[in-house]
Image (cartoon, rainbow, N blue to C red):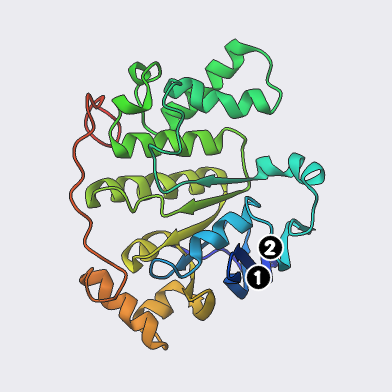
C-alpha cells in the first residue's frame, strides 16, 4: 500500500499495559506497547496465537480497560475515560471481529444487523435506517436480494462483509480488524482485503489490522508491529520489516507465511464446511 504523508499520529498508543485477573494473580497480556498510526494510515499487529494482539485490539476499542498507559485518539486519551464520557466517542472506533458468524445476531436479517447501529445512534426513522443499511450492504458487495436473509444463510465471506457494513454504519474514523480474514479461504481473504483497500481509498478511514500471517500484513498495512508475549519485538514500515526482519521471531513468522507449520502456534486450518443455503458465490454474491 502507498504510505500517507508523514504527520502526527491520529491514534497514539503509549506504554500500554493490559492485565487479566486470575485465581493465581494478575497476568500481563500487553506489556508496555507503544506505536502510532497517522490518519488514513494502516498498521498491522502481527504475532502467533496468544501473543496478546487480540487483547490489544480490544483495549484500543475500549472493550477492555488498560491497567496503564495512554490511548490517544485525535487528541483525546480514551484509556482513562469513564463509560459515560466514552459513549459518544465509541462511534468513531469500530471493530470487525474474527468470527463472522458468532459476531452477528442469528435472529436478525442482514439489513437489521446493519441498521442497528443507526438506531443506537439516534436515527429514529425506520425507513431512513433501512435505506442507509441497504446502501452499506451494496457498498460491501452484497445484492439487494440478500437483505432479508439471516446469517446462517450466508457463506463466511459474505457474513464478514455484513460485519464490515455494520462497523461502517456509524461512520468511524478508526476500524480495528481482529483477524478479520483468518477464518476465510485464501481466495475469499483476497476479496475482503480488496474491499478494505477500496473503502479506505473512498473514505480515508484509518485501519489497525490484527493478524498472525505476514502475507495478509503485506497486502493491507503501511507499517507493522510484531508482538511476542505481549511485547513489541520489532516494528517499522511493512516493506522493510518483511524484506529484512531483524528479530528471529519475525523471521520465523515470515517463514510461516510460506509454511503454516513453520512456527509453533500456527497450524494449518482445516477446510471449512460450506455454509448451508449460501446466497451465492463469494464476493459480490453474483
CA gap, disc 2 and disc 1: 6 Å
Question: What residue is pinned by disc 1?
Answer: 17
Q: In the rendering, which numbered label is found on residue 213?
A: none
Residue drawn where x is 71% and y is 23% of the image: 122
Q: Is residue 281 left or right of residue 224?
A: left
Image location (x, y in percent) of residue 159: 36, 35
Question: What residue is pinned by disc 2?
Answer: 66
Within the image, what quadrant is residue 198 found in? Answer: top left
Dots 2, 1 in contact, CB < 8 A: yes
Q: Earlier in the sequence, mark 2 or mark 1?
A: 1
Q: Is residue 6 above or below residue 219?
A: below
Residue drawn where x is 57% and y is 32% of the image: 169
Residue drawn where x is 37% and y is 27% of the image: 151
Q: Is residue 164 left or right of residue 278?
A: right
Q: Secondary structure at mark 1?
A: strand
Quadrant of the snapshot with the C terminus: top left
Q: Is residue 124 left or right of residue 108?
A: right
Residue drawn where x is 31% and y is 45% of the image: 191
Quadrant of the snapshot with the N terminus: bottom left
Amino acid at each position: 500500500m502507498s504510505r500517507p504523508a508523514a504527520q502526527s499520529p491520529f491514534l497514539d498508543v503509549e506504554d500500554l499495559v493490559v492485565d487479566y485477573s486470575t485465581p493465581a494473580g494478575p497476568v500481563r497480556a500487553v506489556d508496555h506497547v507503544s506505536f502510532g498510526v497517522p490518519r488514513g494510515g494502516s498498521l498491522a499487529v502481527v504475532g502467533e496465537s496468544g501473543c496478546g494482539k487480540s487483547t490489544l485490539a480490544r483495549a484500543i476499542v475500549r472493550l477492555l480497560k488498560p491497567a496503564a498507559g495512554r490511548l490517544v485518539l485525535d487528541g483525546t486519551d480514551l484509556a482513562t475515560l469513564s463509560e459515560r464520557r466514552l459513549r459518544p466517542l465509541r462511534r468513531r472506533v469500530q471493530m470487525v471481529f474474527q468470527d463472522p458468524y458468532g459476531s452477528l445476531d442469528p435472529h436478525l436479517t442482514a439489513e437489521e444487523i446493519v441498521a442497528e447501529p443507526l438506531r443506537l445512534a439516534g436515527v429514529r426513522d425506520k425507513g431512513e435506517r433501512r435505506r442507509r443499511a441497504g446502501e452499506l450492504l451494496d457498498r460491501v458487495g452484497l445484492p439487494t436480494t440478500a437483505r432479508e436473509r439471516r446469517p446462517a444463510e450466508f457463506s463466511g465471506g459474505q457474513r464478514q462483509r455484513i460485519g464490515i457494513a455494520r462497523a461502517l454504519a456509524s461512520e468511524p474514523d478508526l476500524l480495528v480488524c481482529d483477524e478479520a480474514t483468518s477464518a476465510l479461504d485464501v481466495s475469499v481473504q483476497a476479496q475482503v482485503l480488496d474491499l478494505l483497500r477500496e473503502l479506505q481509498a473512498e473514505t480515508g478511514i484509518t485501519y489497525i489490522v490484527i493478524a498472525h500471517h505476514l502475507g495478509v500484513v503485506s497486502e493491507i498495512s503501511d507499517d507493522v508491529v510484531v508482538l511476542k508475549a505481549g511485547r513489541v519485538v520489532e516494528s517499522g514500515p511493512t516493506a522493510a520489516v518483511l524484506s529484512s526482519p531483524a528479530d528471529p521471531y519475525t523471521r520465523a513468522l515470515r517463514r510461516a507465511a510460506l509454511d503454516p507449520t513453520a512456527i509453533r502456534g500456527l497450524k494449518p486450518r482445516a477446510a471449512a464446511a460450506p455454509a448451508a443455503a449460501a446466497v451465492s458465490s463469494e464476493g459480490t454474491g453474483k
